[in-house]
Amino acid sequence: MSALNRVPSLMARAGTASALTLAAVGGSLVVPGAASEAAAASSATKALQVAAAKKGAPYRWGATGPSRFDCSGLTLYSYKKAGKQLPRTAAQQYNKTRKISASSRKAGDLVFFHSGQNVYHVGIYAGQNKIWHAPKTGDVVRLQKIWTRSVWYGRVG
């Protein structure tokens, strides 16, 4: 059965947007105007998978992988593996993303922690108010609930 024939059952199980993304990523469905959104969704999904695969990798300040990471090093590495370029620091990454609201966030979007106007930490949104991130010295890459309301969201284009 082709991916196109599976779309109705996929939509029933995963929701219309997810099914269209799955079909578009598989290359079997063409929706005018949706190609760039599907490409962004597929790179975000890939980046999220890369970050999750680094679970347990030790934190090291300034590290960009493949075995040790700081927060922005993990996001940079994950998106690079997904075919997207990001700058090095959390603040620079914030400046390069398309700003989105909390209600618009999707798995794979970046979550920026801030104090006032200063961005000090970044992670990859995993859904259910959780992020994959490299927290701090002495810790490891892990999935954690977002612990503050002082966050902004950005989507990698």
Image (spheres, helix red, strand yellow):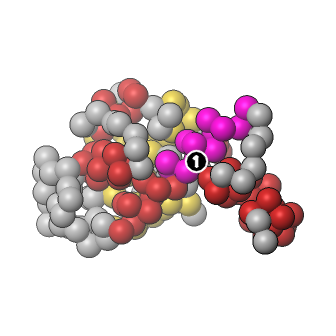
Q: Quadrant of residue 50?
A: bottom left
Q: In this view, does 141 lie above or below 116?
A: below
Q: Nearer the viewer, residue 27 or 90?
A: 27
Location of residue 103 in the rendering, given as x and y in whole percent from the top left corner: 65, 45
Q: Nearer the viewer, residue 67 or 136?
A: 67
The residue stretch that appears in magenta = 33-44
Looking at the image, residue 14 sits to the left or right of residue 64; the answer is right
Bin the neighbour count of mark 1 within 10 Å (Cα to Cα): few under 14, some 14-19, many 20 and up: many
Q: Which residue is drawn at 49% across and 48% down?
A: 43
Q: Residue at x 64, y 57 (%)?
A: 26
Q: Quadrant of residue 127?
A: bottom right
Q: Is residue 124 magenta?
A: no
Q: Nearer the viewer, residue 113 or 88?
A: 88
What residue is disc 1 on? 41
Q: Residue at x 57, y 63 (%)?
A: 128
* Residue 11 visible, this orientation: no
Q: Which residue is drawn at 80% across and 67% down?
A: 6
Q: Quadrant of residue 132?
A: bottom left
Secondary structure mostly seen in magenta is: helix
Location of residue 110 in the rendering, given as x and y in whole percent from the top left corner: 44, 45
Looking at the image, residue 20 sits to the left or right of residue 8; the answer is left
Location of residue 93 in the rendering, given as x and y in whole percent from the top left corner: 35, 34
Q: Is residue 132 above or below residue 157?
A: below
